[in-house]
Image: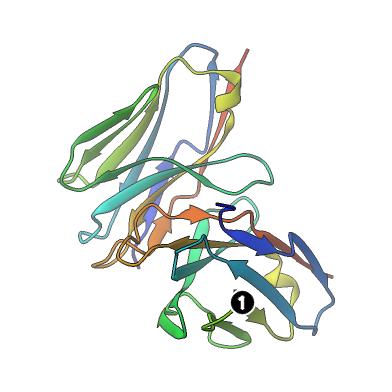
């Protein structure tokens, strides 16, 4: 079946450094790629997303890149802060629409002060 | 706008009992999606509903699970004869018509089966 692989599963960085999380997807029909941040015991929150007709998108310290040919997409967080510590999930839309997502297994990011 | 509201936040059921999880979408949203998250895992799609219609239930287990979104009232995810493996966090999301992308999740219901 279709799947999304996410790496690394855990990531520790020093405050102020950058963090990069990478995902690959298998469904060629995927055309929408959201990223969610989930703090312990809380709901997943959408932090950034990208559509297949765009290669890169940036929002302040967060950026996402997409390589459709290689079926890779990545999340980049610059100037990390302790409050960035959370679990991050990538996702890819499944099938012809954008309403159903398949999620990666998550990256636990720890920003060390 | 109160966002997507789910209740209860925590639900404990004994094996064999029924669990009912409720989701009220954001104001103006008529599309609802249910996902399940097992501990230390990502979310898995269960079902997509519009008012009075199930659009896609490809992620729903074939037995014991059902969902509805009536004309009036919240969407309900119902699990009959719960088993320990049903213990998980169940998240609901909603969107306006035609905007399935980037939906917002509710705070979830954490179901524990004892």
Q: Left of B39 or right of it: where is A10?
A: left
Q: Left of B79 or right of it: where is B47?
A: left
Question: What crowding class fits label 1: few (fewer than 14 Cα within 10 Å), some (14-19), or many (20 or more)?
Answer: many
**Chain letter of disc 1 in the image:** B
Residue furthest out toward the bottom: B63
Q: Left of A7 or right of it: where is A92?
A: left
Q: How is the image coloured?
A: rainbow
Q: Is residue B17 visible?
A: yes
Above or below for A104 versus A84: below
Residue B72: x and y in percent read: 56, 81
User: Element at badge 1?
Assistant: strand
Q: Quadrant of residue A77?
A: top left
Question: How many labels sit on residues?
Answer: 1
Residue underneath mark 1? B77
Residue B62: x and y in percent read: 53, 86
Q: Quadrant of the C terminus of chain A?
A: top right
Q: Is residue B89 visible?
A: no
Q: Quadrant of residue B108?
A: bottom right
Residue appearing at x 65%, y 46% in the figure: A42
Q: Quadrant of residue A58?
A: top left
Residue A38: x and y in percent read: 57, 42
Residue appearing at x 69%, y 46% in the figure: A41
Residues B80 and B72: in front is B72
Q: Quadrant of the N terminus of chain A?
A: bottom left
Q: Left of A80 or right of it: where is A49?
A: left
Above or below for A13 versus B111: above
Residue appearing at x 28%, y 52% in the figure: A32
Above or below for A25 versus B89: above
């Amino acid at each position: 079946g279709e799947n999304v692989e996410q790496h690394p599963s855990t990531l520790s960085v020093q405050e102020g450094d950058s963090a990069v999380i990478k995902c690959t997807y298998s469904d060629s029909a995927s055309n929408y790629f959201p990223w969610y941040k989930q703090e312990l015991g809380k709901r997943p929150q959408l932090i950034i997303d990208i559509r297949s007709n765009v290669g890169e998108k940036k929002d302040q310290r967060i950026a996402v890149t997409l390589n459709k040919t290689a079926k890779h997409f990545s999340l980049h967080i610059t100037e990390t802060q302790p409050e960035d510590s959370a679990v991050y999930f990538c996702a890819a839309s499944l099938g012809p629409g954008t309403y159903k997502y398949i999620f990666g297994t998550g990256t636990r990011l720890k920003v060390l002060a | 706008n109160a966002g997507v509201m789910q209740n209860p936040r925590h639900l404990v059921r004994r094996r064999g009992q029924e669990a009912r999880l409720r989701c009220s979408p954001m104001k103006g949203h008529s599309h609802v999606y249910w996902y399940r998250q097992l501990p230390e895992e990502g979310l898995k799609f269960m079902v997509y509903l519009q008012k009075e219609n199930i659009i896609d239930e490809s992620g729903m287990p074939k037995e014991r699970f059902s969902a509805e979104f009536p004309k009036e009232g919240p969407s309900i995810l119902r699990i009959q004869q719960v088993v320990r493996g049903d213990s998980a966090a169940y998240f609901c999301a909603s969107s306006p018509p035609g905007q399935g992308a980037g939906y917002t999740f509710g705070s979830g219901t954490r179901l524990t089966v004892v």
